[in-house]
Image (cartoon, helix red, strand yellow):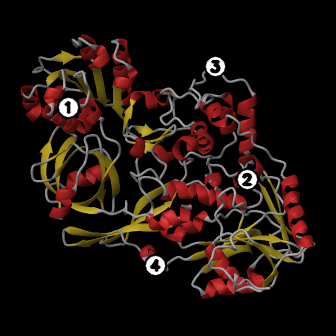
Amino acid sequence: MRPRESLRNRQVNDPWHILPVQIVRTIAETTDVVTFEFAFDDPTVAQEYHFSPGQFNMLYVPGYGEAAISIAGKTPRNGVLHTIRIVGDVTHAIARGGLGMHLGLRGPFGNPWPVESLCSRVKKPSIVVIAGGVGLAPLRDLILTLIDRRKDFASIHLLLGARTPSDILYRYEIDDWELAGLDVHTTVDRSNSRWRGNVGVVTLLLERLSLPECESTFVLTCGPEVMMRYATKTSMERGIPDSNIWLALERNMNCGIGICGHCQLGPQFLCKDGPVFPFANVRDWLRVQDL
Amino acid sequence: MTLKKVTDGTHCGKTFFIDKLELEHLIAHLTSSGYTVVGPKVEDNVIVYAEINNLADLPQGYREEQSGGQYRLSKSPNSNYFEFNLGPHSWKQYLFPPEAVLASAKRSGNRWEFDSSTEENGEFANKFAFLGVRACELAAIGVQDRVFAQGTYVDPIYCNRRSNSFLIAVNCTTAAATCFCTSMGTGPSCSRERENEFDLALTELDTGFLIEIGSEKGAAVAELLNSREPNEIELQAGKSLLARAVSQISKQLNTTNLRDILFNNLEHQRWDEVASRCLACTNCTQVCPTCFCSTVTDVTDLTGEQIERTRHWDSCFNLDFAYMVGGTVRNDRRSRFRQWLVHKLASWHDQFDMSGCVGCGRCITWCPVGIDLTEEVYAIRNTPPSKRSLPVQSSDQSKVCAVGKVRS
């Protein structure tokens, strides 16, 4: 078929279509991070809205613009959770709006974590989830999915790093995750008087972690790039094959669909080829400064 | 003899002869069938693309002189309509408009009403006939088809305009000093073998036009013209004019292994050198017929009640293009120029399975300091790689390699 004919025959699913949503719940996580529950105006849309862990939405505040925010989870009443660091124009507008605010959403976009391929292995793998700061947000729904399918895995570990004890997200539910079979280790950069846990970088937790079989261990990480650099390095030093490492990256995303050009890293469009990548696909590009 | 049978598809690929004045009829026919005819026009001493109402709007008897950072329009002793090559405009401004409203938001009370159906969705809205599309520009349209119309997501505005477009190609009979389409395999003449998609293709002789039918749509329009079979002399004249254009092309870009060479030289010292000349003015990206970067911003009325999501062309040379909370990714001109060139000539192969450069040479002409990408590539190819180079495995290795998608 010649290109022009295929154009005409193609069902154009408008990627610019904005879904109206409302903030129906807010949870203050830290001093600058808030979790919001967004409810779709249209109950049919809410029913049909499906995402996979690791995907993101473009949240749109009219007059301010859009921000690409990873999806932290879904609620029983078909709401979508976003854990947002209040740091830019759009996120400040969302924080100011708060409960009851009406806004727009496009999505879900992007490549998710490879949950299915992890679950369908002959030999049950061990999973190490490494999160730094607000990098836990795109991992939250992954963790819940892994817990749901706990029997498919030999073990599931969460190595969690934060700046201070009060910068740890989801403190109200991490205990539940542990009870459901997640092995949680936490460390902070700076402790306070009440902190009795680890102090130091998150890679120290990885060095200490008991992993019987590194070949069947998978690492899924999200956090500051410098943290991920050392997390991947330490993983490989421990004998985890580089093909078993996945990471979620961040760049300026404007369209979410790979046609605006902003989020490129070498040959990758972060929004449509990522934000979750096999480490091997981005390793060499991350090494180049200012790419 | 006029064209009679058009419905059976037998006219595709056939060539006829028309008088020059028949172009007037062609424009009139297209206009009366609802097309906005867009073609070359002289404006401010350059040839731009603008709406054409009749033959007199075309730049008759003009020729161009182009070189790095230089464009001069002059009168030619001939009275041909298409003796020039390319001005700063490209057809992308009609298919991927520099400014377009993608959606709107209207406040009612504490709520918003969103609407992403624009006037673009109307069936006959923005029906363009492009008159004078050069071979390299057909290739450029093919490149943007892949970007906007053939991925996971398609851009509705582009698709709508593109599927309504009528393309009248013009084979180049001369070449500018900045042209290097032969290196990129895109020209200088249009070819159905190269899967160039055109409805009609013209070759301008001194006496008239050879007109080649490229599609059924083209045949239906050509049927309305007074045409006859070309004689042997006219066909020969056409061939020799096309050969003249090929022989006039002096600029070359060696594309052998180019993707791997650029990926392996991301830390080449030449990037520092070119950064000292580059003004980061974004001209190259604005005149490039394939550059597709854009940004969507909100344009509000004074009350803030009515908001339009407006997309406008952006450029990887802008400082805030890759801005994130953590800071700007590409802070210096070195990294921004590198992004542009490596994307165009290397990453594009991974992303769209083709080069992003069609060899039109506009970025050379319209660069205020005359940076020539063919010279930059030559320098990178022919000076020893610096020590800081990044080893990226070549694309023909089928193993998992550093580059995401391995193409054979």
Mark 2 residue type: Gly
Q: Quadrant of the N terminus of chain B?
A: bottom right
Residue, x 72% and y 68% (percent of image)? B13
On screen, B177 above or below B213? above
Residue, disc 1: A167
Kind of residue at disc 1: Asp
Say what secondary structure mark 2 lies in: loop
Residue nearest the viewer, comparing B61 with A181: A181
**Distance of label 4 from label 2 (alpha carbons):** 35 Å
Q: Report the disc number at residue B123.
A: 4
| Residue drawn at x 63%, y 42% as measured from the top left | B345
How many residues crowd around disc 2 within 10 Å: few (fewer than 14), some, or many (20 or more)? Answer: many
Alpha carbon distance from label 1 to label 2: 53 Å
Residue identifier under label 2: B361
User: Same chain for the residues at labels 1 and 3, yes or no?
Assistant: no
Closest to the observer: B231 or B326? B231
For mark 1, give the secondary structure: helix
Q: Label 4 crowding class (10 Å Cα cut-off): few <14, some 14-19, many 20+?
A: few
Same chain for the residues under marks 3 and 4 in the image: yes
- Do tag 3 and tag 2 residues touch (Cβ < 8 Å)? no
User: Going from the N terminus, do you reach mark 3 or mark 4 first?
Assistant: 4
Choose top left, top right, bottom left or bottom right for residue B273.
top right
Q: Nearer the viewer, mark 4 or mark 2?
A: 4
What separation in Å lies between label 3 and label 4 (alpha carbons)? Answer: 57 Å
Q: Chain of mark 4?
A: B
- Foreground residue, B84 or B217? B217
**Chain assignment, label 2:** B
Up the image or down, A93 lies above or below B336; here it is: below
Residue beneath disc 3: B387
Label 1 to label 4: alpha-carbon separation? 54 Å
Residue B20 falls in which quadrant of the image?
bottom right
Residue B223, labelled with which disc? Answer: none
